Image (spheres, helix red, strand yellow):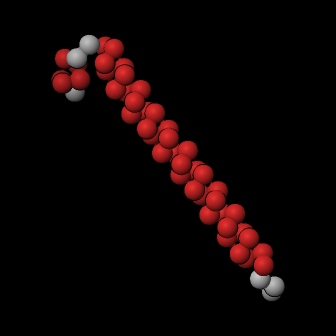
Amino acid sequence: MQNLLQHDLGSSMLSIAVILGWLGLFFVFLRVLTISIKRILEAVFKNRNY
């Protein structure tokens, strides 16, 4: 935390924005992955006649 306060405010805000951006991209990728898996499983189990 002390190292973060030694930098100027702009670079600290930029670092936080980059970290939040990567987290956002990770959650979007995770959401797309779960929707894809859900659709694949629905297609697989829909073809089975029970």
Please tell me which residue is depicted at 41% across the width and 26% down the height of the picture: 17
Q: Relative to residue 34, is residue 45 drawn left or right?
A: right
Quarter of the figure that contains the N terminus: top left
Please tell me which residue is depicted at 58% across the width and 50% down the height of the picture: 31
In terms of image quadrants, where is residue 50? Answer: bottom right
Residue 43: x %, y % from top left: 74, 70
Decide which of 2, 14 is in the foreground and name it: 14
Residue 40: x %, y % from top left: 67, 67
Q: Relative to residue 4, is residue 30 drawn left or right?
A: right
Q: Relative to residue 49, is residue 6 drawn left or right?
A: left
Furthest residue to the right?
A: 49
15 w.r.t. 8: above or below: below
Q: How many marks?
A: 0
Please tell me which residue is depicted at 18% across the width and 23% down the height of the picture: 2
In terms of image quadrants, where is residue 4? Answer: top left
Furthest residue to the bottom?
A: 50
Please tell me which residue is depicted at 62% across the width and 63% down the height of the picture: 37
6 w.r.t. 20: above or below: above
